[in-house]
Amino acid sequence: MLFTTAVFTLLYLPVALAGFFAIARFSTKTAAAWLFAASVFFYGYWMPEFTVLLLGSICGNYFIGLRIGRSRRIQAKRWLIIGVATNLLLLAYFKYANFFVDNLSIVLGIDWDIGRILLPIGISFFTFTQIAFLADAYQKGTTEYQFAHYGLFVTYFPHLIAGPVLHHAQMMPQFGDARTYHWNSANIAGGLAIFAIGLFKKIILADGISPYADAIFQPADAGLVPDLHEAWLGALAYTFQLYFDFSGYSDMAIGLSWLFNIRLPFNFNSPYKAVNISDFWRRWHISLSTFLRDYLYIALGGNRHGPLRRYINLGITMLLGGLWHGASWSFVFWGGLHGVLLVINHGFHAACGAARLEYLGNSRIFRFLSWALTMLSVIIAWLFFRAESFDGAVRMLQGLVGMNDPAPTGMHSLLWNAGLQLDAGYIWCAMLGGVAFMLPNSNRIGSSILELARNHRTARGWIGGAALTASFLLVMINTARDSVSAFIYFNF
């Protein structure tokens, strides 16, 4: 079920919200169980065949979490190993079995076919969420004895399909707080406003620019090399499509949570304003970056064993982070490329020293050049993230450096075949760039709206009414289209 559809906004959400607060008047535990059940229904509506898998994963991890919390250190570690290994094996089977078999068949020259294994939607997110729970149970003594709360923690529908990756300590206190179960008109108004902002990002901005990215990347994957202008337009179009698609989802998730008086962590912080690649990863998909740092990079040794080991750990972390996004060598290369960029960045900082870096940081020219180099690196890396094949990404790179000149008439054939105009695409990209680079991000805007709604009772009606109207119109626009596009991160 998509947040952008009429069935979600006009049917599912009102029923889930009304049921939650109506039941909470009599029993907060039952209200939590209601929201748990509603979240499972939300998942099952899309992929009913994997609902049993989701519930089985929840029951298994809940049981192992209890064993970790109630066992002595050595036994607890054994349970942790069992839990993490089981989660990773489950993820590996559904997400990577075909990738492994296909590549092994090529290497060995055999025809080994296990059939196409369907990827359960959201499996990467609910698996990582539960691995974090088990690790916290072992390291911090975290336990959860109410099954409904744990189930809700994993399945909570605003984050279930595409994150953020949550920590037990972020959510459980909110589920146990009596204030969560009382209707709050300020949070309702503010949540609707944030949700509407996310809808606008997805339906108007991300989906509006997506035809230009598809018109270039799809022929490149099919064997054609775009010309210089087409390649740059396609690269920029996807750069902004992905940004507003994922940022829009994150905003909608935060807004929906506020309706239930639950706060999700920010998962986006203007990443295209980053002045170096480390800064970018502190701003992009913050919850995943934090997970990879806390449970992989630090577990590998972090920076505790000297610069060389630190750089190796960075590279391994980013390679696995790329593989997490998808079973494809292009994703692995994308992760490895970011690992190389992070190593270069850390090496540059080490060579400069703190005093020199502070001096350079005060220079506007240096900051601009640093930002421009970071954006160029991110854009080039996105080619391997978007292309369906490694060869397709290479053809896009060839186009970026002008290895395929346009026809003498100046006609850009890939755009022309799709019925699109180069100038219109560049105007789109310029407009989206202005929003991403110049305007305050939706975290600040949303926080300001919430503060206004809390401090001014009369403003709540205006905010809520405007947000409801905008959301309804946006959903109707989306419904009137030939097809409704899913969020890009649903594929991961």
Image (spheres, helix red, strand yellow):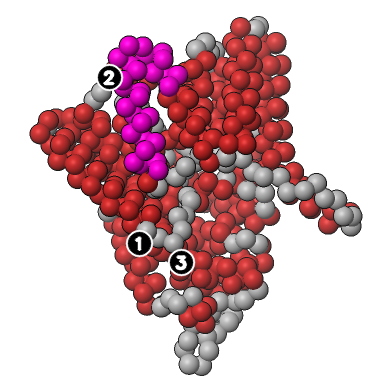
User: Is disc 2 placed on a helix, strand or loop?
Assistant: loop
In the image, the segment drawn in magenta is 7-34
Read off the residue under disc 3.
Answer: 211
What is the C-alpha distance between the residues marked 3 and 2? 44 Å
Question: What numbered label is drawn on residue 182?
Answer: 2
Label 1: state its secondary structure: helix
Is residue 319 found left or right of 157 in the rendered image?
right
Query: Disc 1 marks which amino acid?
Result: Gly
What is the C-alpha distance between the residues marked 2 and 1? 41 Å
Q: Is residue 446 above or below residue 337?
A: above
Question: Badge 3: how crowded within 10 Å, few (<14), some, or many (20+)?
Answer: some
Query: Looking at the image, is mark 3 or mark 2 earlier in the sequence?
Result: 2
Q: Tell me the residue that label 1 is attached to.
A: 433
Which label number is shown at residue 36?
A: none
Disc 2 and disc 1 in contact, CB within 8 angstroms = no
Q: Position of residue 84 (x, y in %)?
A: 66, 26
- The picture places residue 428, in percent across and down from the top left corner, at 35, 67
Identify which amino acid the numbered label 3 is placed on. Answer: Pro
